[in-house]
Amino acid sequence: MPPSQPSRSLTPRERRLLRLSNLLFILTGVVAALYAALFFIPGLVPAPLRPSALGPTASATPIPPQTATSLAPNARTPTPTATATPTSEARTATPTRPRSSTPIEAIPTSTGTRTRTPTITPTPTVTQTGTPTNTPTPSRYPYTVQPGYPIYSAYPGGCNWMGFAGEVFDLEGKPVIDLIVHIGGADHLVLSGASQEFGIKGWVDKVADRPASSRGFYSVQLQDAVGNPLSDAISLETFNDCRRNLITLNFVQNH
């Protein structure tokens, strides 16, 4: 037997090549095992990653050709344009009777004019009849001027006098005393029923020594003891006339 030769040690490069070859062999076996598992046991792979899931997506790609077929009707659109000429003739024929008849039917539908007539009828004549004609009669004050007054007459004492006089009556026509009569312009205050110069319980006030003409200067108003108005301030006109130097003004209670 020939003598055994001593074993040679591998170089670093050979070692690396040997390791790479072993790793490649192992990876090849792993890949083969994975393919076998995918083929024989498909449940090992998740549903989104299974090869069968790729089928519908591939089948979904043929959809664009179907959309291309949908373009075919667009090719048909020129055909209606060619038929547009007969449709124009049909349009000329159709407006002759049916369309002309419809506006004629629309004219009688203007029954809205009849609806306008009821709007005129509801004019509330009742409100006119209900206008309270009696409301203006009551005054905001309890006393008003007695109808027929003022009265102008000659003062019995002569022409060297000008003033006002009168009486105040309640709802029953009885004389009312102790109410204040304010004569504006002269700014005089007298009490109703305080004077009996004319034989009655009235009021008399002298404002001047002789008659004089004025308009809106003098006024007469009835007041209570505190000075609250019981009547409107009645503006009176005076005259430079001895036959009209006494102005009589009576007040009556109205409510």
Image (spheres, helix red, strand yellow):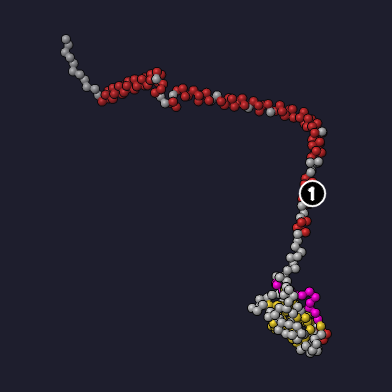
Q: Nearer the viewer, residue 153 or 107?
A: 153
For the C terminus, the image quarter is bottom right
Q: Position of residue 90 (x, y in %)?
A: 78, 30
For the N terminus, the image quarter is top left
Range drawn in magenta: 141-152
Q: Is residue 236 magenta?
A: no
For the point 31% across and 23% down, which residue is it? 23
For the point 75% across and 58% down, which residue is it? 127
Q: Position of residue 131 (x, y in %)?
A: 75, 61
Q: Which residue is mark 1?
A: 117
Residue 180 in sight from this viewpoint? no
Instruction: Determine whether 153 is above or below 92 in the image.
Output: below
Residue 9 in sight from this viewpoint? yes
Instruction: Determine whether 209 is above or below 81 in the image.
Output: below
Q: Amino acid at mark 1?
A: Thr
For the point 79% across and 43% down, which residue is it? 111
Instruction: Determine whether 243 is above or below 145 in the image.
Output: below
Taking 118 as reference, is 30 left or right? Answer: left
For the point 70% across and 80% down, which residue is it? 177
Taking 32 as reference, is 153 left or right? Answer: right
Taking 121 as reference, is 10 left or right? Answer: left
Occupied quadrant, residue 163: bottom right
Q: Nearer the viewer, residue 107 or 11?
A: 107
Q: Nearer the viewer, residue 6 or 108?
A: 108
Occupied quadrant, residue 79: top right
Instruction: Determine whether 185 is above or below 68 in the image.
Output: below
Q: Position of residue 173 (x, y in %)?
A: 74, 75
Q: Residues within 10 Å of mark 1 (few under 14, many from 20)?
A: few
Q: Is residue 151 magenta?
A: yes
Which secondary structure, mark 1? helix
Q: Position of residue 49 (x, y in %)?
A: 43, 26
